[in-house]
């Protein structure tokens, strides 16, 4: 009877414990040990009554809901040092009794809102040694009240869910060391009354905001949980903003200052308090005065220096702080942008720069040139809504506006730097006060405006950039019906056109002129040297020939065969040998002789004059041949 009973026990044990694992049943609690087993996934036949499950040092890559389904009694789950890159939504949804979750040493890049949902009684969460760059704001919501130990060290975190961490009243240990955190929000740890260890080592913190939590670091008698704070390895900027931390008197720590230059490298706690100083703000530059046309965008700029960097604010003409709205936007760098200006925006604006050391102000004057109101030039302008030219252009470009079929807007006679805009007379029932043309290129989003009288139906655009795409819209401004009404703007049509590219002949001629000048200069020197050498040889040869005496033949008689000797003929006197012509290789002052180099130089000068005066003047218009064209390219 013994062998069958043994086989039965072995069979029941094999069904309860996965084959590569070791199972231990101690004191009515089942432990399943599957570490170092080369597993590629969680074994599907793990006993659902398991209390401790160890799956460390394997090759598991992903976790999903089926892996831990119905394991409501699981208390300790270890998944350290695997290759986990993804955790499915509610993968731990049934682990309501889980107290400890180890996910360190994996390859997690982010945690979604549902990645850690389920373990409502979790106390220890270890996520160190991953590649986390993002944690969703609600990732820890299920165990905010119970979590005591959170380890996020050795990751790539720039931001952590501070709102969730600040709402963990039972948190004892928080490890954020060796990340990329560069700022802590004020009051991030104000509610963590039980926190006893905070590790911020080796981040990118330049300053720390004052927090009552840090004052518990050396006051063990007054606080039930004295704080152990570590923040070495950060590029601390030792100015007056950190003076509160310097006064905590922690001389045993080895934090150092990274800036300003006078304190770089010195131990933080050894720097006297008087050297933790700040520089008051100084307005470096700002817009002095700005004139804009009603309906256009106005950009006011103000730049300030100081230590720490000043905070910038703007106060409007009504002595109110200018905030972000649908019409205006204030940027942190000191720029104030008003999208659509009206008469009510004119006045003096004040730029205010503040930091802990003081403040500085500068005044900017904004003038808004009101558009003429038909029949009533004294009308008070308000904040224009329908005359928002920029909005009209964007609406037309996106196809949201309703374009009228007549009159159509056309751009003809397009050259490299100009184009003729034409439009029809429009409907007689609609009074037109003036036309406005607005256009911009594909390389610049800034709109350019042109005002055209109502009697005109053509306008020549100049100063365009060659080889560029343009979008153009034509608007008709109608007179206001009453003194308090705004100018009505009606979109007549839009057109798209492209300017011709710059003539390649211009570039070729310019390159030819530069290269040809250098070639002629070098060639002229070589030819002149060769001709000088040739002249020297000729002069030397002539001198050698004049030194020889010519042979004189006297008493020469011809043979007569015995007959009387003929009377010798009188020879004409020998004329001196002709003087050799002087070489025209060099110009020695003779008006009738021009050297080759001089003739070549004259020919090249005539050619250069022809190219610059004729070809470049005709074929290179708009490329920089005149002052007017230069201004066009600048505009």
Image (tube, rainbow, N blue to C red):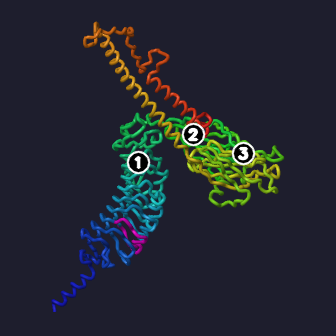
Which residue was labeled with disc 1?
204
Residue 188 location, x and y as percent?
47, 54
The front one of 502 and 176 is 502
Q: Is residue 625 left or right of residue 120?
A: right
Is 214 placed above or below 55 here? above
Q: Is residue 346 left or right of residue 506?
A: right
Give yes or no for residue 99 being in the magenta stretch: yes
Residue 558 location, x and y as percent?
28, 12
User: Earlier along the polypeptide chain: callout 3 or callout 2?
Assistant: 3
Q: Is residue 23 left or right of residue 479?
A: left
Residue 214 location, x and y as percent?
43, 49
Residue furthest to the bottom: 1
Is 71 placed above or below 308 here? below
Front: mark 3 or 2 = 2
Quadrant for the C terminus, please. Answer: top right
Residue 551 picture quarter: top left
At label 2, counting other C-alpha atoms closer than 10 Å, the crowd grade (few under 14, some 14-19, many 20 or more) is some
Front: mark 2 or 1 = 2
Which residue was labeled with disc 3?
451
Give yes or no for residue 102 being in the magenta stretch: no
Residue at 47% across, 49% down? 211
């Amino acid at each position: 009877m013994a062998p069958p009973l043994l086989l039965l026990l072995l069979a029941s044990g094999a069904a309860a414990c996965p084959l590569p694992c070791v199972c231990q049943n101690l004191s009515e609690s089942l432990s399943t040990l599957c570490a170092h087993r080369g597993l590629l996934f969680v074994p599907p036949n793990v006993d659902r009554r398991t209390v401790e499950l160890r799956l460390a040092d394997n090759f598991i890559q992903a976790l999903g809901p089926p892996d831990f389904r119905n394991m409501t009694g699981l208390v300790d789950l270890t998944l350290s040092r695997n290759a986990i890159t993804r955790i499915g939504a509610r993968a731990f949804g049934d682990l309501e009794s889980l107290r400890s979750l180890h996910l360190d040493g994996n390859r997690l890049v982010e945690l979604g809102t549902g990645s850690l949902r389920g373990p409502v009684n979790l106390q220890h969460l270890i996520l160190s040694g991953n590649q986390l760059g993002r944690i969703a704001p609600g990732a820890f919501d299920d165990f905010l009240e119970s979590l005591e130990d959170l380890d996020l060290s050795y990751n790539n975190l720039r931001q952590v869910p501070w709102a969730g961490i600040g709402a963990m009243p039972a948190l004892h240990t928080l490890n954020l060391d060796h990340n990329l955190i560069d700022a802590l929000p004020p009051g991030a740890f104000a509610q963590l009354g039980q926190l006893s260890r905070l590790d911020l080592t080796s981040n990118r913190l330049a300053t720390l905001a004052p927090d009552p939590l840090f004052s518990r670091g050396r006051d063990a008698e007054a606080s039930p949980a004295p704080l152990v704070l570590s923040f070495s390895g950060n590029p601390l900027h030792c100015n007056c903003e950190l003076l509160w931390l310097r006064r905590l008197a922690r001389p045993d720590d080895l934090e150092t200052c990274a800036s300003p230059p006078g304190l770089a490298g010195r131990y933080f706690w050894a720097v006297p308090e008087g050297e933790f100083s700040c520089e008051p703000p100084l307005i470096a530059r700002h817009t002095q005065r700005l004139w804009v046309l009603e309906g256009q965008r106005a950009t006011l700029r103000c730049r300030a220096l100081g230590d720490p960097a000043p905070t910038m604010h703007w106060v409007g003409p009504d002595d109110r702080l200018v905030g972000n709205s649908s019409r205006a936007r204030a940027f942190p760098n000191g720029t104030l942008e008003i999208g659509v200006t009206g008469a009510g925006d004119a006045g003096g604006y004040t730029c205010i720069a503040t930091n802990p050391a003081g403040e500085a102000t500068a005044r900017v004057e904004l003038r808004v040139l009101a558009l003429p109101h038909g029949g009533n030039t004294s009308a008070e302008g308000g904040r224009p809504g329908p005359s928002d030219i920029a909005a009209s252009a964007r609406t037309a470009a996106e196809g949201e506006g309703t374009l009228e079929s007549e009159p159509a807007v056309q751009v003809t006679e397009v050259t490299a730097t100009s184009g003729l805009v034409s439009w029809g007379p429009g409907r007689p029932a609609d009074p037109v006060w003036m036309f406005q043309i607005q256009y911009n290129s594909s390389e610049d989003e800034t709109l350019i405006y042109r005002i055209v009288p109502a009697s005109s139906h053509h306008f020549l655009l100049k100063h365009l950039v060659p080889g560029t795409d343009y979008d153009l819209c034509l608007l008709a401004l109608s007179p206001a019906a009453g003194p308090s009404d705004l100018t009505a703007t009606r979109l007549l049509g839009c057109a798209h056109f492209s300017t011709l590219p710059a003539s390649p002949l211009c570039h070729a001629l310019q390159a030819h002129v530069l290269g040809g000048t250098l070639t002629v200069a070098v060639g002229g020197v070589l030819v002149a040297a060769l001709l000088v050498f040739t002249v020297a040889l000729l002069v030397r040869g002539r001198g050698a020939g004049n030194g020889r005496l010519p042979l004189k033949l006297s008493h020469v008689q011809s043979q007569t065969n015995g007959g009387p000797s003929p009377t010798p003929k009188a020879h004409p006197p020998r004329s001196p040998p002709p003087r050799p012509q002087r070489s025209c290789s060099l110009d020695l002052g003779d008006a009738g002789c021009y050297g080759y180099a001089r003739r070549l130089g004259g020919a090249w000068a005539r050619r250069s004059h022809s190219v610059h005066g004729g070809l470049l003047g005709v074929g290179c218009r708009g490329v920089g041949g005149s002052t007017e064209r230069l201004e066009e390219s600048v505009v």
